[in-house]
Image (spheres, coloured by chain):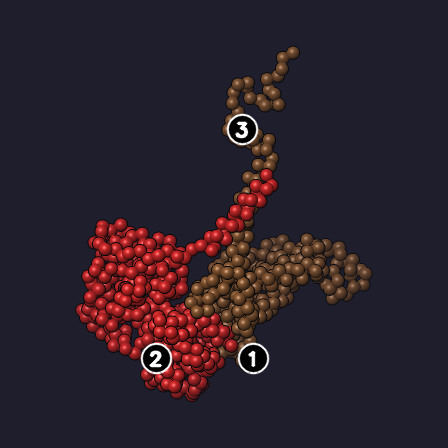
Amino acid sequence: MKRRWRRMALLGVVSVVAAACGGGGGGAGEPLQELGDGEGQVNIVAWAGYIEDGSTDPAYDWVTQFEQDTGCQVEVKTAATSDEMVTLMQEGSGFDLVTASGDASLRLINGGTVQPINLDLIPSYSTVDERLQNASWHTGDTDGDGEAEHYGTPYQWGSNVLMYNTDAFGGTAPTSWGVVFEEQTLPDGATNAGRVQAYDGPIYIADAALYLMAHEPGLGITDPYALNRDQFNAALDLLRQQRTLVARYWHDAFIQIDDFTNEGIAASSSWPFQVNLLKAGGAPIDSTIPSEGATGWADTTMMHVSAPHPNCAYMWMEWSLNPKVQGDLAAWFGSVPAAPAACTGNELLTDEGCSVNGFDSFERIHFWKTPQSDCFEPGSGKECVAYHEWVTQYLAVIGGR
Amino acid sequence: MSVGSDVGGFPDAPGARPSVSRRVSAFFFRHPRVRLAVMLGPGLAWLGVLYLGSLGALLVQSFYRLEEFTGLMVREFGLATYRVLFDRANVDIILRTTAMAAAVTLACAVIAFPLAYFTARYASSRMKALLYLGVVMPLWSAYLVRVYSWKLILAKEGVFNWFVERIGLDGVLDALLRLPGIGGPSLSQSYLGMFIVFVYIWLPYMILPLMAALERVPATLLEASGDLGARPGRTFHRVILPLALPGVIAGSIFTFSLTLGDFIIPTIIGDSSFFIGAAVYVQQGTAGNLPLAAALAVVPLAIMAVYLVLAKRAGAFEAL
């Protein structure tokens, strides 16, 4: 009796350990060759506000029509960070699609979590902004046949901006990110120390690299996401200097809004979302893209490697490129459509909407992508600092090391 | 002589089958070991598989390491991850968290003691119920809501600053905020503010066990101490404190371990410096560095183990 119990306990421990050790793996299957009937449902992991069915505001609804046309019921699971998206997809509990940003998409591709898609089944792909069609954050030659596979359809993109308090800057827009990196006296006569914020994510190291790209050409940075050891250390030094100025790092849009309202913050990297909300509330706030350019995000609808509803997933990807959907979404989210046709004639976005949200700054934006140890050039022999080290080092910088 | 049909005292008529529930209870009556297994099984399975199992998995993970070049996890046993754990940046995080937990525990004990003492000794039963309710009531509202409202209260343009200015103490507050290490641009952006919020959030967990412990201290002992000539201070030191020590230790285990593990407050209040909880969250989520996250998560376990051993040495569990 006693011995049997012991054996069963051992079995339990072993199975727990085995479960912990298992997971991962799962090869990418062949993409769908022919569109079949819908499965009646499609499950999407998305940013909050990305997939609206009219329940928040009846004017913003790009789900109901799709459901009527295809019979595919849309189920949305919202995620708050790229990391949450990656985790949700890796756990693989029945999700078909994810609206992944560039700092998640390569992780999903390399981890074998998403599958290549068959562009023949998405006729609208040709209407996608040519600047996005073959972007590096959703394509890659993973099977080694010399031809890049596509891992999804571009959804929306946008830019990080320099948000500033117009009172502190005397009504003129700052022209350089220097106001958040270098100690200086702002036009209102007070120092910027304790009055600036920085983004609380390791990807922000790229913002420092972007600043150095313009001001320290000797470092030879060409891509703020592909940094060799020297460039990476220089960026960290700049961030350590910034640490002495930063009162708090932000990651929650509403905390940042609160800090600009109640803590007297003068400048920070931010998103159009916060700028629009603060301006709408009458705060003395504006934003700009300084001379160095800016980092930004571009989101891609990607398909899970074992998506349970592949036909509905393809139908959604096709639908998501529809100009009406793209324009309504851009108006709602403060982003730029992936399909330029959406920029004209959309009631909600208006004809100025695209340029207000940054359509013409595309060349000045360096889009988020997960840093890779091979500098995005496999086989070139180059060595870049990998993302996990970005994380540990940025943690140390915030901790004052 | 006829043999009675109700053998063993069962009242059932001969031939009739006993009901199902009776047969089940009879079965358990005859097999006490099975009964014990059925009663203890669910709880033990929960503890054994879910709790100890996941703890074991955590420990195992912490001995894996992350391959430097690819950033992928290598499932080989080794101490590489623990070497990373003792990098200066990580040691900073551990020390920062432990110092905060110790300060919060101390402050909670000092604040909670008089309140608990009054409630246990002097309050009428009506008053006692009221005080008890007052202590427990904050726990009824959501933790996040309370932390966010503290952020607003402590903001530079928040109500606390306004009040301090009104009573003319803003100079004192500014001087406090200029202190190196614990200061900052405003209370909500400093360690001082974080400390205040931590103390507020965990205080009930100190008060409740203290109340229970102080209620058990017999009043006669205090009178005896006075009769034998001890001044109040001496009575407190030699009688009340030793007898209430189990309560203090129980409360401090709550406040200390809860502060060690919290990852919400340090991300909302303070200057964004990392604490163990937040570092674990970032390492496993953002960095995908499960081994380091696991190793970091082992730290509070180790600290608590040391703490409990010290508490036992101090005789905290003898009076239980």
**Mark 1 = which residue?**
B180
Q: Is residue B148 left or right of residue A269?
A: right
Determine the chain carrying the residue at label 1: B
- Say what secondary structure mark 3 lies in: helix
Q: Which picture quadrant has residue A4?
A: top right
Q: Which mark is residue A384?
A: none
**Mark 2 = which residue?**
A222
Q: Position of residue B246 (x, y in %)?
A: 67, 57
Task: State whether residue B225 is above or below residue A167.
Answer: above
Distance from label 3 to label 2 (Cα)? Answer: 81 Å
Give the letter of the brown chain: B
Q: Nearer the viewer, mark 3 or mark 2?
A: 2
Give the letter of the red chain: A
Q: Residue at x 50, y 57 (%)?
A: B140
Q: Residue at x 53, y 31 (%)?
A: B24
Determine the chain carrying the residue at label 2: A
Q: Position of residue A248 (x, y in %)?
A: 46, 75
Q: Do the numbered discs 2 and 1 sit on residues whose CB atoms are within 8 Å?
A: no
- Say what secondary structure mark 1 lies in: loop
Q: Residue at x 34, y 84 (%)?
A: A175
Residue closest to the far top: B1
Q: Are marks 3 and 2 on the same chain?
A: no
Q: Which picture quadrant has residue A305?
A: bottom left
Could you tell me if residue A332 is visible in this image? no
Closest to the observer, A204 or A20: A20
Task: State whether residue A236 is above or below residue A189.
Answer: above
- Say what secondary structure mark 2 lies in: loop
**Mark 3 = which residue?**
B23
At label 2, the amino acid type is Thr
